[in-house]
Image (cartoon, grey):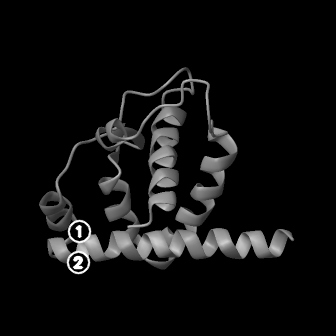
Amino acid sequence: MIDYVNSRLVMWAEWVVRREEGALGYPKECPYTRLQQRSGGVGFRPNFASDALEIDAVMTKLKQQNPLKFRAVHLHYGVEFKRGKAVTVNVTGEQIAKDVGKCRDTVYNWIDCAHRFVLDALHERDLVEE
């Protein structure tokens, strides 16, 4: 797991749910985000909209290439779509594996691959912008 990408995906998952709630305040907390420290005005404070949009573009590419892997990443970060609306969920690796029809180890491998995919996409974007 790549910590930088993990924190970006955590913020992205929070943004997805917050966007569905009308972007008013913080969303109902994703189970996974409870592990992340909140910024209290000191230190790094991300720009949720632009950072999340950047990750969302990468995740759209992932969805086009591999919809099951995309679903596994969504569930891993505590986001599920019900009736077209993003809601928070708390699922285990085994539950994600059952949902996508793969074994638990494959799901964790997919999460790791998704982290590398995101990092590569962010790196390519930085190279293009320079």
The picture places residue 32, in percent across and down from the top left corner, at 32, 44
Q: Secondary structure at mark 2?
A: helix
Query: For the point 51% across and 48% down, which residue is it?
Result: 12
**At x 52% / y 40%, what residue is drawn?**
15
Q: Up-down: is 95 above or below 34?
A: below
* Residue lying farthest to the right in this orientation: 130
Indicate whether 52 appears above or below 21. below
The secondary element bearing badge 1 is classed as helix
Q: Amino acid at mark 2?
A: Thr
Q: Label 1: few (<14), some or many (≥20) within 10 Å?
A: some
**Which of pointers 1 and 2 indicates the residue nearer the eye?**
2
Three-letter amino acid code at disc 1? Val
Nearest the viewer among 52 and 112 is: 112
Left or right: residue 18 versus residue 42 is left
**Is residue 21 at least partly visible in the picture?**
yes
Disc 1 to disc 2, C-alpha distance: 10 Å
Where residue 127 sits: x, y (%)?
78, 75
According to the picture, the residue beneath numbered tag 1 turns out to be: 100
Q: What residue does disc 2 label?
A: 106
> On screen, 83 above or below 73?
above
123 lies above or below 93: below
Q: Are marks 1 and 2 in contact (CB under 8 Å)?
A: no
